[in-house]
Image (tube, helix red, strand yellow):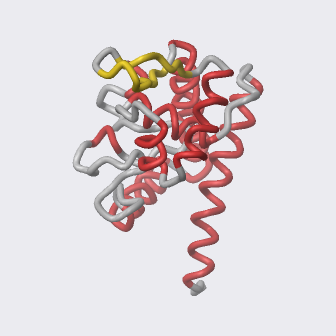
């Protein structure tokens, strides 16, 4: 059966939404009812060095104002802190808190569980083929030459992150730092 390009796009989007929606619901079940995918993206960008709203906005491809609102929410919930930059007294420095890293690690574990579930459904060989083909087709590119964090995508730890993975399975994750 031949499908259209639009069908393929919808299948890929459906797979993404299925994983993200299930992971978000599971995070809520585990006590993190207030976490949304954008919060994961933001915390990972902050952990990777986005130290202020302007930089976070650039890495997430949103306005400085939208980034500032996300920072305020994350700070209110205890996932990030905003302190004075010791190098520039008038500048604020963002950091992910231990609670924020706990959320990131929990999200990673949930995505591993969801991957295992897909593996049981379609088999290890089929899932490996799917991952191999998707990697060949899209690699780590979200924006040409950049990953979701806005970094050059030459580092295995900077693969696309969807409420979970920033790392390769056999390398240190950002949440382990």
Looking at the image, which residue is at 57% across and 53% down?
122
The extreme left residue here reads: 154
* Position of residue 138 measured from the top left corner of the image (x, y, whole percent): 38, 64
Left or right for 163, reference 87 = right
The extreme front residue here reads: 90
Residue 117 falls in image quadrant: top right
The residue nearer to you, when weighing 177 against 170, is 177
Q: Quadrant of the N terminus?
A: bottom right
Looking at the image, which residue is at 44% across and 43% down?
54
* Position of residue 128 measured from the top left corner of the image (x, y, whole percent): 41, 52
* Position of residue 16 measured from the top left corner of the image (x, y, whole percent): 60, 55
Looking at the image, which residue is at 58% across and 23% down?
103
Q: Quadrant of the C terminus?
A: top left
Residue 22 falls in image quadrant: top right
Residue 2 falls in image quadrant: bottom right
Looking at the image, which residue is at 66% across and 38% down?
23
Q: Is residue 58 above or below residue 98?
A: below
* Position of residue 148 measured from the top left corner of the image (x, y, whole percent): 43, 50
The residue nearer to you, when weighing 155 against 64, is 64
Left or right for 114, reference 155 = right
Q: Is residue 6 above or below residue 37?
A: below
Report the number of discs.
0
């Amino acid at each position: 059966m031949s499908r259209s390009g639009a069908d393929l796009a919808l299948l890929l989007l459906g797979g993404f939404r299925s994983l993200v929606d299930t992971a978000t619901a599971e995070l809520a079940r585990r006590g993190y009812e207030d976490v949304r995918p954008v919060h994961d993206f933001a915390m990972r960008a902050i952990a990777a060095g986005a130290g202020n709203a302007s930089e976070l906005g650039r890495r997430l491809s949103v306005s400085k104002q939208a980034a500032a609102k996300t920072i305020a929410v994350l700070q209110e919930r205890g996932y990030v802190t905003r302190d004075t930059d010791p190098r520039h007294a008038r500048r604020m420095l963002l950091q992910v808190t231990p609670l924020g890293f706990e959320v990131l690690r929990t999200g990673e574990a949930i995505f591993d569980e969801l991957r295992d579930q897909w593996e049981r459904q379609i088999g290890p060989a089929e899932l490996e083929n799917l991952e191999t083909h998707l990697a060949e087709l899209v690699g780590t590119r979200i924006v040409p030459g950049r990953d979701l964090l806005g970094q050059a995508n030459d580092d295995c730890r900077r693969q696309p992150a969807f409420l979970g993975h920033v790392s390769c399975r056999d390398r240190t994750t950002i949440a382990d730092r």
